[in-house]
Image (spheres, grey):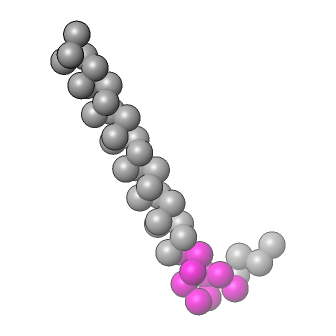
Amino acid sequence: MNNHNKDKNGYGKVAFWQEAFINIFSLTCRAQEKMLDKDAR
């Protein structure tokens, strides 16, 4: 694979952190929705 070139110019790390941030954001959104559902009942 071509991962070495990606890391050299920093693109690989940016994409990794961007993906991680999106994953965490979606997880927190789901957790909040579950809590809201519990409160609504």
Location of residue 4 (image quadrant): bottom right
Q: Is residue 5 left or right of residue 41?
A: right
Main SS class of the magenta portion in the image: helix
- Residue 37 percent location from the top left of the image: 28, 20
The residue at the far front in this view is 40
Quadrant of the image for the N terminus?
A: bottom right
> Which residue is farthest left?
39
The answer to whether residue 15 is above or below residue 37 is below
Q: Quadrant of residue 39?
A: top left
17 versus 33 height, above or below:
below
Foreground of the two, 39 or 3: 39
Q: Quadrant of the C terminus?
A: top left
Q: Is residue 1 magenta?
A: no
**Left or right: 15 as drawn, with respect to 23:** right
Q: Which residues are magenta?
A: 5-13
Query: Residue lying farthest top?
Result: 41
Q: Is residue 39 above or below residue 29?
A: above
| Numbered-mark total | 0
Q: What percent of the width, then of the height, locates residue 3?
A: 71, 76
From the viewer's perspective, tell me whether residue 29 is left or right of residue 3.
Answer: left
Residue name at image x 25 percent, y 25 percent: 35
